[in-house]
Image: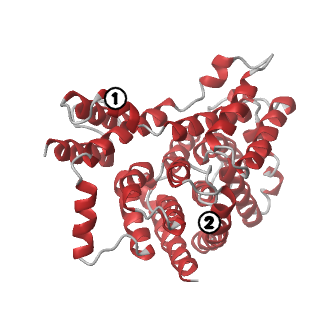
Amino acid sequence: MLSTIIFILTYIGVAIGRVPGLVIDRVGIALLGAIAMVVFGIVTMENAVAAVDFPTILLLYALMVVSAQLRLGGFYTWSVSKILNLLPRPRLFLLVSMIVSALLSAVLANDIICFAFTPVLALSLNRAGLNPMPFLIGLAVSSNIGSAATLIGNPQNMLIGQVGKLHFAQFFLWCAPPSIISLLGSYLILLAFYRKKMNLHQPVASQVAEEAWPVFNIWWSTKGLASIVILVILFLTPIPREISAMAVSGILLCSRKLKTRSILGLIDWHLIILFCALFIVIEGISNGNYPKLVIEYLKSSGIDLHNLYILAGVSAVLSNLVSNVPATMLLLPFLDPTNPVEWYSLAVSSTFAGNLILIGSIANLIVAERASPYGIAMTFKEHAVVGIPITIFSLMVLFLWTWI
């Protein structure tokens, strides 16, 4: 019973994102839940350590090192700067910017893409006198959709791939088609909403210094891009993904110019701690056989999570209640390890669901926060107006693809 209380309080806290009277975020709440599971003896120290899926943590960490290499090399800001000459043609610029962010998010962390792209887009759109909203929402939406296509596109996909022992190429072949169609549909939906509003924005003076952006370094960026190519090749071999990623990240740390401290300073330690804490919380609730009881109750109520449509729907709802990663961890024990399509469906649906509302994914919040210093306010309502139809369309594409 105590484990259930701790689990419920932890997930409610993660869903709300704060505790009244305290300055504590989702990571802190999850960590407190893990600490409570150990302190009250629900999970022993040994079991807590064993509960953490270290291959997933190592893969996540290694890919963050690769992303840090590209970020310090100025590759992200260089990429978006190369398409700025399309600004006089707003519709084409929107399409190209969404394609670029989706492609990069498929092989790198979508959060990093949004973090790096937003300032360059915001400043350039302001100077061009364009309405920045469709382009910034397009950035968030496309990065989420693009990240759904591969096992390394976002944290929840990495977790699903590691736990389910999924094949990299097979995952891509199943998940890429609905992602591509959803990306095109999202572009058309954005055009429908903003067709007559793209040039209604007055230039806004920015106080943010451009010098704060990383300067493009061709050698550092080439090393980062080469490491990605090598990783994808290695991921197609029987070598464990975490071993391949750690080896490549270790080579990147051997630099004569980039300090180790600079690279490791860009590691998202908060996300890693969130993963570890949730592993322990899930272990605590699993000790009481509660997942099995829950799935039996759901089946008796006519809700079978092995039904791909129901699984995708539940995943989408949970992802907007408690965010993608906690929702994924909650649903993983219910999946059939012999049916990879269930794992594919969970990966795509939990990622697509992030486009529903502003707080649906970290990528959305990063875009909103990074655009704010440039005088751009992305409100909950403005995002939801296009986010909801985009998510509905994407999930319909997923349902159709599942049926086919």
Q: Nearer the viewer, mark 2 or mark 1?
A: 1
Q: Amino acid at mark 1?
A: Glu
Residue depicted at x 48% and y 67%: 342
Q: In x, y percent, where is residue 179?
A: 63, 67
Task: Write down the residue under mark 2.
Answer: 175
Q: Is residue 302 above or below residue 217?
A: below
Front one among 231 and 389: 231
Q: Amino acid at mark 2?
A: Cys
Left/right placement of residue 98 relative to residue 385 reads right
Hey, which quadrant is residue 273 in on the image? top left
Residue at the far right: name it.
218
Assess disc 1: are there few (<14), some (14-19) or many (≥20) residues with their C-alpha within 10 Å of its C-alpha.
few
Let me know if residue 127 appears in the view.
yes
Front one among 359 and 255: 255
Hey, which quadrant is residue 59 in on the image? top right
The C terminus lies in quadrant: bottom right
Q: In x, y percent, where is residue 396?
A: 51, 77
Residue depicted at x 66% and y 63%: 170
Let me know if residue 206 appears in the view.
no
Number of the label disc, if any, that sits on residue 46: 1
Left/right placement of residue 48 relative to residue 149 reads left
Left/right placement of residue 297 relative to residue 64 reads left
Number of the label disc, if any, that sits on residue 30: none
Residue at the far bottom: name it.
404
Residue depicted at x 63% and y 68%: 174
Front one among 114 and 401: 401
Under tag 1, what secondary structure?
Answer: helix
Q: Is residue 339 above or below residue 237?
A: below
Q: In x, y percent, where is residue 29?
A: 30, 36
Q: In x, y percent, where is residue 387?
A: 49, 64
Q: Is residue 226 above or below residue 314?
A: above
